[in-house]
Image (cartoon, rainbow, N blue to C red):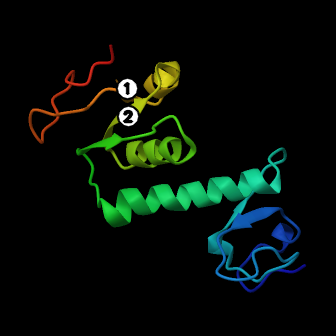
Amino acid sequence: MSTGLGVDPGSAGWRVAALVKAGGWASHVLVGAQDAAEVPEGPGAAEAETVVVNGITAWQMLHRTSRVRAGQRVLVHGAGGGVGLILIQLARAAGVQVIGTASARHYDALRELDVTPAAARETCRPRSANWPPGEWTPS
């Protein structure tokens, strides 16, 4: 294995995850350094791949489809799941407030991420587009 111009030669041989268009199951692929993320010890290949796919899905939902901006609020359904948890972190990094639907067992974890939890089985009917705080207080 080797690195190209402008890439730290010491990174050759690192275990990385990347989203590629073709050759994803090959033992070696050519990928730009900016498109690869180092995978720490511990997670298996399937787990690393899951994080990449969930992360791309969350990023596209938040930034490409919704085009959120700092100061806005979003409602994340399935906030306790793989895509939801990554979407929450991306939203918080962008300065976006998050309300997340989830099962009650996920509420504490969501609160630790500065998310207002809402019951997954209740119908959320905001009175206005401004979504006032407290409107979705979990029961």
Return the residue nearer the eye: 110 or 77. Answer: 77
x and y, in percent, of residue 95 in the image: 33, 44
Side of 24 relative to 78 (left or right): right
Q: What amino acid does circle 1 point to?
A: Pro
Estimate the spatial distance between the alpha carbons at disc 2 and disc 1, rounded to whole Å.
Answer: 5 Å
Q: Secondary structure at mark 1?
A: strand
x and y, in percent, of residue 130 in the image: 12, 38
**Which label sits on residue 128?**
none
Side of 36 relative to 124 (left or right): right
Q: Check the image and report above or below for 22 versus 61.
A: below
Identity of the residue drawn at 28% across and 19% down: 137
Identity of the residue drawn at 83% across and 44% down: 42
Residue at numbered disc 2: 100
Side of 55 relative to 32 (left or right): left
Identity of the residue drawn at 75% across and 75% down: 24
Q: Check the image and report above or below for 102 versus 82.
A: above
Side of 13 relative to 18 (left or right): right
In terms of image quadrants, where is residue 82?
top right
Return the residue nearer the eye: 79 or 36. Answer: 79
Residue at numbered disc 1: 117
Looking at the image, the residue that sits furthest to the left is 128
Identity of the residue drawn at 77% across and 85% down: 4
Looking at the image, the residue that sits furthest to the bottom is 5
Quick one: quadrant of the N terminus?
A: bottom right
Q: Check the image and report above or below for 92 versus 109.
A: below
In terms of image quadrants, where is residue 68?
bottom left
- Mark 1, residues whose alpha carbon is within 10 Å: few (<14), some, or many (≥20)? many
- Mark 2, residues whose alpha carbon is within 10 Å: few (<14), some, or many (≥20)? many
Return the residue nearer the eye: 47 or 38. Answer: 47
